[in-house]
Image (cartoon, rainbow, N blue to C red):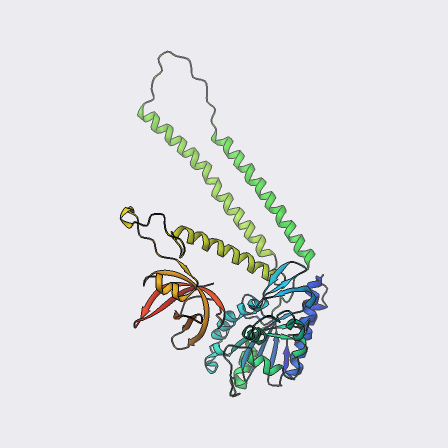
Amino acid sequence: MAQFLGRDQLESALHSSMVLSQSDIKGLEGELKVGDLLAKYLPDDTYVIAHPSIGKYDPDFLIISPRYGFRLLEVKNWSINNISNVYSNGAMKIASIDQTRNPLNQVKKHIDEFNGYLKSLKISTLGDFYKLVGFSVIHIGFNRSDIQQKISNWNSMNRDSFFKHHLFADQLNNNLDYLLEKATKYPIYDRRVMLSPATIQQIVESVTISDEITNDNPKEVSNKLNKFDEELAELKNQFASIKSDNVEQVKEPISPSPVTTNQEKPTAEQTLGSRQRRGKQKKNKASFVPAIVLVAILGIGAAWLFLPSVKSDTTKPNEEVQTTKKAKEVSDNQNTQKTPNTVNEQPVNSNTNEQDSTTEPTVSNSTYTNVTDLTTNARLGDYVELEVTVQQFTYDQGSGTKFLILGDSQSQMDGVIFKGTDVPFISQGETYKFKGEFNAYKGKEELIINSVE
């Protein structure tokens, strides 16, 4: 029986005095059930840790095994009747809310944070820990046979890839340790000890259990939001009042000029003095604005810091969708501004002799969906986008460089991600949009990658 850390916190959250939503209750019940089954069927030398604090967000479970290393788990207590469609990338469409959720992406985002956490521990005996980290989604609400009916038209490759990282209620049994061992892109076949007891103990002692397992009281959050709205409205009124008073101070009474037949033009000294007075008045008026803006920013920032962080299963996917949408809009706008043409479109003025010689040449930023089009149309040194599948992925621990083979069944090319380049977790067999410089090394074409979507 494995050692289950964090169970008391899960049970306390479930039976606390907080007003929990039905979604929170169902989620906590599912996590408790899964945690107990993990502890029951995993070996004695294995640790099951609920909601470990390893980064910005904590996974539902962290498994530490001396034979295969680490597994990050996301638990879903969904009903099979509420899943209207399943996709090969792990996404599922939830009928009741008409939204698509991807729990696989949800657990993948913990990997980079966990790698950073392990690196910060500076444990020399960990070695190449990058290859010891795997992940899986556990669906406690239904069995494997239930989902097979919804993916009966998939090919064998997609089915195998899906079931490699998805486990179900009927699989939480004596075979569980073997299934978790396979849930990685770096399978280990020799069954040798990967982590010594001393190393595991050092890691376990460093891990703390998150104190934000579920949402805060929804009524309390609502009260804080209402209070924030009231303070913001009061701040706006104060701003409007100060602005109005400031405008009145700027205005000067103008006495009617006597009607004369011979009006004198103002001298240069008088004109200069008049401009200086107007400039001073405008400066005094403008000086109020930065102060008000600063107060507003500080007030809003303080109000948001006052609000609790929300980490429920229903909010995190919405945050991801909004963030991804904003990032895509910015990327599309930038591409529209920088790129005069795509693969299928030509610029309006294709005669370079007629272009304005004072305009700096634009950098190529064409998007390609296969390697052949890229190597045929792009020039060395061009900055391009290539949406393609990762056929092979390797990581050199010494240099920190990631080496990829990109392409499809017809063509492929090398991809390189140098140390220090911030990219998400990359899975072999998945399709991504790579951005970088089309180059050549020792006569072989490659893509030097600096961004991955």
Q: Give left or right: position of 432 versus 48.
A: left
Q: Nearer the viewer, residue 79 or 47?
A: 79
Q: Nearer the viewer, residue 149 or 441?
A: 149
Name which quarter of the figure residue 2 lies in: bottom right
Q: Quadrant of the N terminus?
A: bottom right
Question: Which residue, as the protein is rendered here, is positioned at the far top?
Answer: 261
Q: Nearer the viewer, residue 199 or 428?
A: 428
Q: Position of residue 128 (x, y in %)?
A: 46, 79
Q: Is residue 109 above or below residue 354?
A: below
Note whether residue 207 is visible. Answer: no
Q: Position of residue 9 (x, y in %)?
A: 66, 71
Q: Position of residue 89 (x, y in %)?
A: 55, 68
Q: Is residue 168 above or below residue 215?
A: below
Q: What residue sits 48% from the left and 41% below the top?
A: 289
Q: Nearer the viewer, residue 253 or 166?
A: 166
Q: Give left or right: position of 265 versus 38.
A: left
Q: Is residue 105 above or below residue 34?
A: above
Note whether residue 161 is visible. Answer: yes
Q: What residue sits 64% from the left and 67% below the top?
A: 213
Q: Position of residue 235 (x, y in %)?
A: 58, 44
Q: Is residue 244 above or below residue 354?
A: above
Name which quarter of the figure residue 42 lies in: bottom right
Q: Disc count in the image?
A: 0
